Image (cartoon, helix red, strand yellow):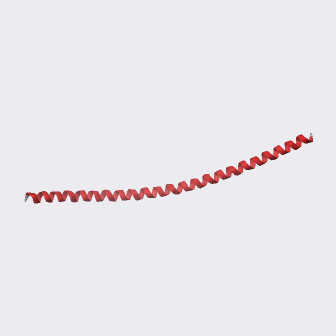
Amino acid sequence: MELLEQLDSHIDTLLSTLEQIRSENEDLRAEITQIKDENSALEEKNRSLQEALTEEAEIRRQALAHVDGLLSKIENLERIGDENE
């Protein structure tokens, strides 16, 4: 009889442990889902920032090209002015 009581006790312990593991597993799955959602949001923000950075670089490139063009015009005007003197 004592063996059956020990077996019964071990089974209760195992069932309790199983329930605890299932609960922890459920919590971990919820945490994983939350982390995946946060990761997706961060990836989208990263894409958006990359696009903005690319646009900013293009605007900067165009502005520098425009400034270079204006400087060339000024240099040409100075040369023409020097030639006329």
| Identity of the residue drawn at 77% across and 48% down | 69
| Residue 17 locus on image (x, y percent) | 24, 56
Q: Is residue 4 above or below residue 61?
A: below
Residue at 71%, 48% (x, y): give it. 64
Left/right placement of residue 71 relative to residue 37 reads right
Asked where in the image residue 78 lies, by quadrant, the reply is top right
Would you identify the image quadrant in which residue 52 lies? bottom right
Q: Is residue 18 above or below residue 80?
A: below
Q: Residue at x 45, y 58 (%)?
A: 37
Residue most extreme to the left: 1
Picture quarter with the C terminus: top right
Which image quadrant for residue 34?
bottom left
The percent position of residue 14, horizontal first and vertical second, equals 21, 58
Residue 71 percent coordinates (x, y): 78, 45
The mark tally for this picture is 0
Position of 25 with respect to 47 (left or right) is: left
Quadrant into which the N terminus falls = bottom left
Q: Position of residue 21 (x, y in %)?
A: 28, 57
Residue extending farthest to the right is 85
Identify the residue shown where x is 78% and y is 47%: 70
- Left or right: 7 in relation to 82: left
